Amino acid sequence: MSLAAATADDPNALGHQPDADAGGVANQRIIVGYGFWIFLVSDIVMFAAFFAAYAVLSDATAGGPAGRQLFDLKTTAIETACLLLSSFTCGLATIAAHVERRGWFQAAMAATFVLGATFIGLEVHELAGLVAGGNGPQRSGFLSAFFALVGCHGLHVTLGLLWLSTMMAQVVAKGFRDDILRRILCFSLFWHALDIIWVALFTVVYLIGSIT
Amino acid sequence: MTDTPATAAPGSTHAPAQSVGTQVLGYAVGLVLAVALTGISFFLPHSALIWAPGVPIGLVVLAVAQMGVHLVFFLHLNTGPDSTNTVLALAFGLLIVFLIIAGSLFIMSHLNHMMPPMDQVMRMQR
């Protein structure tokens, strides 16, 4: 990245501005964000493997029900709305953290938590209903891949909720210190990335699954 | 930064040089676009708006567009110098994602195609 030592006569530094508060390397916030971004990309690659398994197995219903018979798009629409709105409130929380407004931060994080928990509740209800109807992951290759993919995303959201509540507690206990702000940044990146994966998931699994 | 980008890159400067209103507006615009794209996605399969066999492709296009909206408005990916490395990492990740998904689909459909019918396999094993 940009070097503080970069001068106007250094052709390699063209287009890079030296950072105001860094001596030599980019500031810590950029480095932390970049490192976490690498993790997110690796997480997306892992989800790609689950998506590939689902795409390969989506016709392997073994005489059992296909997605068209199982999926209730109304539930999916509510889940999608919850996750989308939670992404928005998560963004509001990061803005509140930047300007160090504790009340707004905690309110936005609480709203994010409620929306995320609603999403998880609906998903658990849906999956439990499938299992109760004899359409659990052991029914067919299609359902195995479906439970693995949706369950993996649900697990990520659950861990995100856990992380969210620890961030609320850390702000109460330690305030908006630099390291806490960096953790909030990483959490918001994580939460937005989960929303992106859900976009792929509801499109490929639920919407395309309900018409083929 | 001299040329302040419209939005702060992932992990950019400590306090983005924007007013709170501008930042909230950014997220609101992203939300509106995402809701619109999601709404069209859910509406499309039950409408006769486009040719039925083309619906899956239309849905994929809408999903890719929505992911772009999320990346720009929520994850603040931009063309500023602070985003160069993140964009490169994401591009590499997308290459791997493409290889995994397209490769799996190609190999498995090829295997299915070459697989002899099951009774023939049984006969060969006798």
Image (spheres, helix red, strand yellow):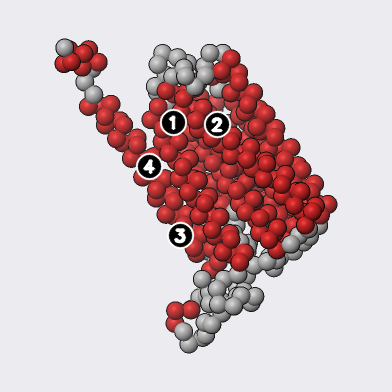
To which chain does the residue with label 4 belong? B
> Do marks 3 and 2 both belong to one polypeptide chain?
no
Residue B15 in sight from this viewpoint: yes
Q: On the rendered structure, is B97 left or right of A147?
A: left
Can you tell which of label 4 and label 2 is closer to the viewer? Answer: 2
Measuring 23% from the left and 17% from the top, which residue is drawn there? B117
To which chain does the residue with label 3 belong? B
Q: CA distance from mark 4 to mark 2?
A: 20 Å
Q: Secondary structure at mark 4?
A: helix
> Within 10 angstroms of label 2, few (less than 14), some, or many (20 or more) residues?
some
What residue did someone put label 4 on? B100
What residue did someone put label 3 on? B88
> Within 10 angstroms of label 4, few (less than 14), some, or many (20 or more) residues?
many
Q: Quadrant of residue A19?
A: bottom right
Can you tell which of label 3 and label 2 is closer to the viewer? Answer: 2
Q: Secondary structure at mark 3?
A: helix
Q: Secondary structure at mark 2?
A: helix
Residue A54, disc: 1
Sequence-wise, the earlier of marks 2 and 1 is: 1
What residue did someone put label 2 on? A151
> Do marks 3 and 4 both belong to one polypeptide chain?
yes
